[in-house]
Image: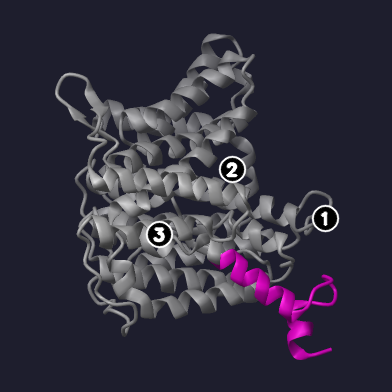
Amino acid sequence: MSAMDRFFKLTEQGTDVRTELLAGLTTFLTMAYIIFVNPSILGDAGMPKDAVFVATCIAAALGSLVMGLYANYPIAMAPGMGLNAYFAYGVVKGMGYSWEAALGAVCISGILFLIVSVLRIREMIVNGIPHSVRTAITAGIGLFLAIISLKNAGIVAAHPATFITLGDLHKTTTVLAIIGFFLIVALDRLRVKGAILIGIIVVTILSFVFAGNKFAGLVSAPPSLAPTLFKLDISAALSIGILNVVLVFFLVELFDATGTLMGVAARAGLLKAGKMDRLNKALMADSSAIVAGSFLGTSSTTAYIESAAGVQAGGRTGLTAVAVAVLFLACLFIAPLAGAVPAYATAPALFFVSCLMLRELADLQWDDTTESVPAVITALMMPFTYSIANGVAFGFVSYAGLKLFTGRAKEVPLIVWIIAAIFIFRYVYLGAE
């Protein structure tokens, strides 16, 4: 047995180096869209797009490398969709905090995540959150992404009387976005690897021809990371007004990471008696990547469900994640291409991801209104208040309240009462902001 075989336990998992590397390439192609989407979203928060591009690539590489070498799972990592939107549109543009303070909040949430992983109390927290609320958070983030993507595509626009209305469908950029969306869905249905990435690239190419976009080249030396490196503001993030932001980051990171890790491991046949042997190692890899990403200059890094594509291609060990890390580092040299991708080219990708996230609502207990109503409130409040935090807050408060008013208060776990009380305190004493 080679040293690599022994380290990654390739033979034990019934795989080989070639299979693992191909699985890594497959996973990378399905999630590489993040190197275009993340700078676009965080750029709207005032962050330097070139530096965010570098931070995105490095954070994804570091997270995937730690997951592969430390936890030995075929699970890739990168800045998470939904959390980046909350960072930009909820915390910075919505609440008025600086992006430096928002990075500080990400860092603190990552440290909390690391603590609950080390102390092994993650399971108590996750099991204490009602399934309906956990499900609704994912669906609500999908709706939040939907309204952002439709706005970026020009399909919806502001209206003084109705707040929102149909945009100008005659605009070239809007037409290109619509074409991109149908292309992504069709390619995904035909099981074409990298469907989302292909859609973004095709719309970008068309934008040079029909929308006046300028091509600045394909390859160059990586841009400077200095504008975002170590720019996080921990002291601002510790102010009482932003603590609810830390809580939301922490909860979403915890649910997202745990659900993704368990889901991909199950797909790979790596669960034993329904559990992951090295779940805590995987969670520590996840949380350490969040902290590292905040220092680099990007929103929360998390495990990617797209890793299931690599598992489907035969990936069973951490070598798959290491391959993904190497490919993300190689992407550092395509900064000109990333900078040329317009918002209406990434909008179809966002909208497609949002559509996939909404299927979580199918798992709700619709016959029990004390379960389904708080879930629906959670999901709807996110886009309608333009805030993931508000959706999570109203979900927990309504869940606890409805159980209390229907004589079923004993069904509410202690952690739900605590979180609901924190959010009530926030609204009563600190206001909506």
Q: Which residue is mark 3?
A: 202
Q: Is residue 15 magenta?
A: yes
Instruction: Name above or below for residue 423 compared with residue 316.
Output: above
> Callout 1 environment at 10 Å: few (<14), some (14 to 19), or many (20+)?
few
Return the residue nearer the eye: 146 or 376.
146
Distance, label 1 to label 2, CA atoms, is 22 Å
Judged by depth in the image, the label closer to the viewer, 1 or 2, is 1
Magenta range = 1-28
**Nearest to N terminus: mark 3 or mark 1:** 3
Residue type at numbered disc 1: Lys
Q: Which residue is mark 2?
A: 125
Q: Quadrant of residue 360?
A: top right
Residue found at x 74% / y 52% = 266
Q: Position of residue 179 (x, y in %)?
A: 39, 46
State if disc 2 and disc 1 touch (CB < 8 Å).
Answer: no
Q: Position of residue 225 (x, y in %)?
A: 29, 76
Which image quarter holds the C terminus?
A: top left
Judged by depth in the image, the label closer to the viewer, 3 or 1, is 3
**Dot 2: element:** helix
Judged by depth in the image, the label closer to the viewer, 3 or 2, is 3
Residue 272, label in figure: 1
Q: Residue furthest top?
A: 406
Q: Position of residue 213 (x, y in %)?
A: 22, 62
**Dot 3: element:** helix
Q: Is residue 361 left or right of residue 314?
A: left
> Callout 2 environment at 10 Å: few (<14), some (14 to 19), or many (20+)?
some
Q: Residue furthest front?
A: 209
Q: Is residue 9 magenta?
A: yes
